[in-house]
Each structure stands twice: as C-alpha cells, then as structure tokens.
C-alpha cells in the first residue's frame, strides 16, 4: 500500500469526487444521452448507395473472388506436385 502524507489525497481520489450513488446514476444517464445523440448524428451522415453503385461493387467482389480462387488453385497444384515429387524421391507414396 502506498504511503501518503497526512492531508494529501491520491490522484484517483482527486479525479473521482466522492459524492455517492446519485451522481453516478446522473453521470451514467448523461453519458448515455450524449452517446445516443452522437449515434443519431452519425446515422444522419450515412448515405445509401444507388442501385448502380451496388451492382458495380458486387461485380468487383465476385470477379475478385474468382481471381483469388484461380490463383490459390494454381499455387496449390504446384505445391502439391512438388510435395509428391519429394515424397517419391524419398521412397514414400508411389
């Protein structure tokens, strides 16, 4: 336990006033109200994309998925053949 000189308070005691449960509830209420106001303000900034934008981004996603699938298929095939060659040379699987 830290040693504190008489008459001096710790930093935590100074930062958090000791005024009981009523201020804690009031503080919780005001923080909740502020949070909900901020949420409402952020929701006003949200813009719904147009049908053309959704179609364009969906096309990009689908093409990208197929491109990555082809890439991983090629890499997997090459690495599979390398592993099979190493195993055959070591006298493993025939």
Image (cartoon, rainbow, N blue to C red):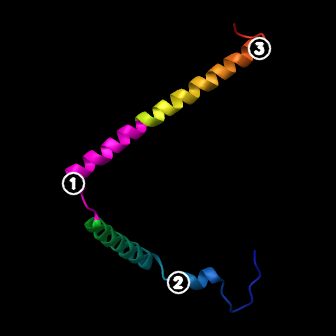
- 18 to 39, vertically: above or below: below
**Disc number lying in front (2 or 1):** 1
- 1 to 91, vertically: above or below: below
Residue corresponding to mark 1: 50
Residue 35 pos. (x, y %): 36, 70
Q: Residue at x 36, y 76 (%)?
A: 30
Q: Residue at x 37, y 42 (%)?
A: 61
The secondary structure that most of the magenta stretch takes on is helix
Judge left or right: residue 87 versus residue 41: right
- Separation (CA) of disc 2 from disc 1: 51 Å
Q: Does label 1 or label 3 sit earlier along the sequence?
A: 1
- Separation (CA) of disc 1 from disc 3: 59 Å
Whether the magenta-drawn stretch holds residue 50 is answered as yes
- 81 to 63, vertically: above or below: above
Residue corresponding to mark 2: 17
Marker disc for residue 75: none
Residue 1 pos. (x, y %): 75, 74
The part of the image, by quadrant, that contains residue 41 is bottom left
Q: Which residues are magenta?
A: 46-65
**Disc number lying in front (1 or 3):** 3
Residue corresponding to mark 3: 89
What crowding class fits label 3: few (fewer than 14 Cα within 10 Å), some (14-19), or many (20 or more)? few
- Closer to us: 10 or 79: 79
The part of the image, by quadrant, that contains residue 36 is bottom left
Whether the magenta-drawn stretch holds residue 40 is answered as no
Residue extending farthest to the bottom is 7
């Amino acid at each position: 336990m830290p040693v504190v000189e008489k008459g001096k308070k710790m930093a935590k005691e100074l930062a958090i006033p000791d005024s009981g449960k009523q201020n804690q509830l009031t503080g919780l209420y005001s923080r909740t109200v502020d949070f909900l106001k901020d949420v409402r303000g952020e929701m006003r900034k949200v813009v719904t994309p147009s049908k053309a934008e959704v179609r364009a981004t969906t096309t990009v996603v689908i093409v990208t998925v197929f491109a990555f699938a082809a890439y991983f298929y090629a890499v997997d095939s090459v690495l599979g053949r390398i592993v099979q060659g190493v195993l055959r040379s070591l006298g493993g699987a025939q």
